[in-house]
Amino acid sequence: MTATQIANQTASHNAAHMAHQVAARSASRAVVLASADPALRQRLRESLTGLRWRVYEAVGGAEALTLLEHEPAEAFIMDAWLPDLEAAELAAHIGLLYPGVDVLSVDGAALTSTRSPHRHELLHAVREVQQPIQPPAKTDTAAWNAAPAVLPRATSAEPWRTSSLGASADVLLDFPSSVPVISPRTTIFTAPKPSATSIPGLIGESAAMRELTDLIRLVAPRNSTVLIEGETGTGKEVVASAIHRLSSRAQKPLVVLNCAAIPESLLEAELFGHTRGAFTGAVTARTGRIEAAHGGTLFLDEIGELPLAVQAKLLRFLECGELQRVGDNEITRVDVRVIAATHRDLEQRVVDGAFRLDLYHRLAVFPIEVPALRERLDDLPALAEHLLARLGADAPRKRLSPGALEALANFNWPGNVRELAHVLERAVILSADAPEIAAEHIRC
């Protein structure tokens, strides 16, 4: 290629890029696009921008809901598969929250009754991206081999078939490393269909777990304060982590503080930070847990153990988003979502005078009850299998005999999932070299 040809090609590319920018700036209509496939998003963005639409992109449903909350949009286009939320559930949720938004799938199907006056443009853009890309001339074999494969979109018959996953999807999905990749040109894979909960870390298909999952999906995209209640060992921290991962704050830190594990004299400084010399032993200034979670989520475990003096200061932060380090006169503003958890009855603690009523109401904006294991024994086989798989990561994996499973089902599990994990670990040790755990190895 001559220098003149290169210059002409560069000028043409720059002109096209500038045209896209001008069209985007002058666009008066906005559309939110949700897909975990970056290639699909790019092709739809280019097509819609050329039709004078402003395009806001999201990898998952939680991020898309955040965009809709802050950007007035006329339409919403979503992929048939999203890494965090069920497509049908998300469409119904948007229809309730934003009745004026036209919701379409990437195959052009209308998912709500609202119809945009410019839907024909949206359908034109969708039809364009569905057209397969023609390969280069046969003589240009190297260029064709280097080009990314164009993959079929998911269909209603194969809702879990997808072409690619973005970086943020890797955080949400835990696919096994054995998923086959046939060749660099054939990157289509069928992911194993997840459980009904579809949230990593939450195992089970019982009605109680389905209800828990529904609550997590509803509250995760919001900034509402969440109070997670449940017995010791039920997995309250797992629920908090799931809410964080499904929120728009997923790329920011999740900071955890166990309020029962830190002496009362140090808890305020640990939570709010302190300046140098603020108290004996404070040889350097330190950032508190709240400030460290700026932009992300703060998880306060065992909130019922928080001293009354610290409760008043925490209430102040929750109400205005401001904190004051110990020994400092300056006020610092931070953006933090708070999730709290407790195994205590906070309402009874309020009656006993050990917990502030105003703080309780501020924390319990969206309460979530994590069910005890004895309330969802239908999930016991799946939970046991999951825990044995973890225990078998560094040793031969064991299986449960029918008698062992029956012994597990007949126990009341006061320590819940944490106790089940300990019982199974003990059984793995007691079974020695045997491939199967028998009933006599189960010692609850």
Image (cartoon, rainbow, N blue to C red):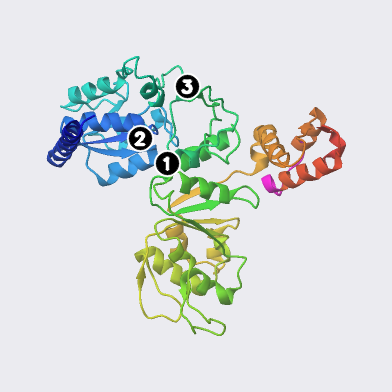
Return the mark for residue 93: 2
Does residue 120 sit above or below 279 in this rendering? above
| Prevailing secondary structure of the magenta residues | loop
**Magenta stretch in the rendered image:** 410-418
Count neighbours of disc 3 (C-alpha within 10 A) and say few if under 14, some if 14 to 19, many if 20 or more: few
Q: Is residue 300 left or right of residue 52?
A: right
* Residue name at image x 59 percent, y 32 percent: 176
Residue that numbered label 3 is attached to: 186
Q: Position of residue 434 (x, y in %)?
A: 86, 34
Q: Position of residue 7 (x, y in %)?
A: 17, 36
* Residue name at image x 60 percent, y 48 percent: 235
Closest to the observer, 4 or 93: 4
Using the numbered discs, state the Cα–Cα distance from disc 2 to disc 1 in whole angstroms: 9 Å
Q: Are marks 2 and 1 in contact (CB under 8 Å)?
A: yes
Residue depth check, mark 1 versus mark 3: number of the one nearer the observer: 3
* Residue name at image x 60 percent, y 29 percent: 178
The magenta stretch spans residue 414: yes
* Residue type, numbered disc 1: Leu
Residue that numbered label 1 is attached to: 218
Closest to the observer, 409 or 423: 423
Residue, far top: 138
Sequence-first disc among 2 and 3? 2
Q: Secondary structure at mark 3?
A: loop
Q: Secondary structure at mark 1?
A: helix
Sequence-first disc among 2 and 1? 2
Sequence-first disc among 1 and 3? 3
Using the numbered discs, state the Cα–Cα distance from disc 1 to disc 3 in whole angstroms: 36 Å
* Residue type, numbered disc 3: Thr
